[in-house]
Amino acid sequence: MILGCHVQMKAPEYLLGSVKEALSYGADACMVYTGAPQNTIRKPISQLKAADAAGLMAENGMSMERMIIHAPYIINPANSVKPEVAELSVSFLQQEIQRVHEIGARYLVLHPGAYTVTDLPTGIQTIIHQLNLVDVPSDVTIALETMSGKGSEVGFRFEQLAEILAGLQQNERYGVCLDTCHINDAGYDLTDFDDVLDSFDHTIGLSRLHVIHLNDSKNAKGMKKDRHANIGLGTIGFDVLHQIAVNQRTENIAKILETPYINKKPPYGIEIEMLKNGKFDAKKLEL
């Protein structure tokens, strides 16, 4: 069971501080943005203490594959309506791919995007076109994230992601990040995770599953709203999420928590401890 969480990256320690934060929670992995997700302002990789971060991870038995990078939200490969958005999606995504390469990480999680005012087939074809304009080096893998289906999001069914993957020229350098909150909200029944994995395997292939976002949901199955809840405090529930965390078919895949802060405090250390112990205690989350 490889458990991690979303951590901050800020001055003065940057990625080194990110790893220290993850370790303080008892995490075996972490996920970071290489800069603010809502803008294009980025510090040079030379300032981010990537080598120091890699060294600290190695000291704790963690490979750099366990440092997951999340692409910024402003990249929308599905938008075919605004040329400036399309241009930004390609150029900024290419920059983020290069940053992952320079950091020495492996996986870049990317939201497939939203088609806005067109339609789903157009959105899928636009994503394929946009992603085929970027070059992905052999040591980087882009993991397209499963979405909830909110608004005009693309990627809330495995079949949609399979169609995108099939159309990519660098097909072997892409895979999937499965978000438990998102697929619950999209209508998948997580009470039998092996059944979900069977469906994923049949449609996409389990070898393409590289990252799992382990989140509870504030919404009932199929509501398509995308609101994360803390582990055990949502509609999915602790027992189901624990079974997902310990599932042997995904034991080598990092499970990353993106759960909400409680009273402005990160809950990750408590949630990771409960998942490792297999025991839920709601009082521990009263931070």
Image (cartoon, rainbow, N blue to C red):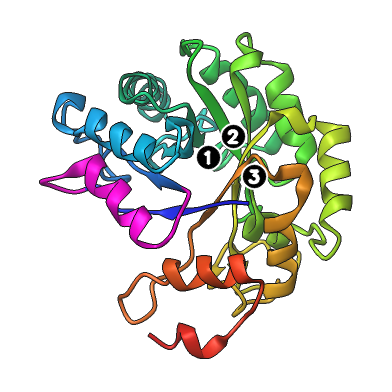
Residue drawn at x 74%, y 18% is: 166
In the picture, measured across the screen, residue 99 lies left or right of residue 223, that is left
Q: Earlier in the sequence, mark 1 or mark 3?
A: 1
The number of discs equals 3
Task: Give the residue type at disc 2.
Answer: Leu
Image spot of residue 75 (x, y percent): 41, 34
Q: Residues within 10 Å of mark 2 (few under 14, many from 20)?
A: many
Task: Give the residue type at disc 3.
Answer: Thr
Q: Which residues are magenta?
A: 10-28
Residue at mark 3: 146
Q: Are marks 1 and 2 in contact (CB under 8 Å)?
A: yes
Instruction: In this rendered view, identify the residue nearer to me: 131 or 125.
Output: 131
Q: Residue furthest left?
A: 12
Q: Earlier in the sequence, mark 1 or mark 2?
A: 1
- Distance between the Cα atoms at labels 1 and 3? 8 Å
Q: Are marks 2 and 3 in contact (CB under 8 Å)?
A: yes
- Whether residue 223 is visible to the viewer of this picture, yes or no, is no
SS for callout 3: loop
Residue at mark 2: 144
Task: Give the residue type at disc 1.
Answer: His
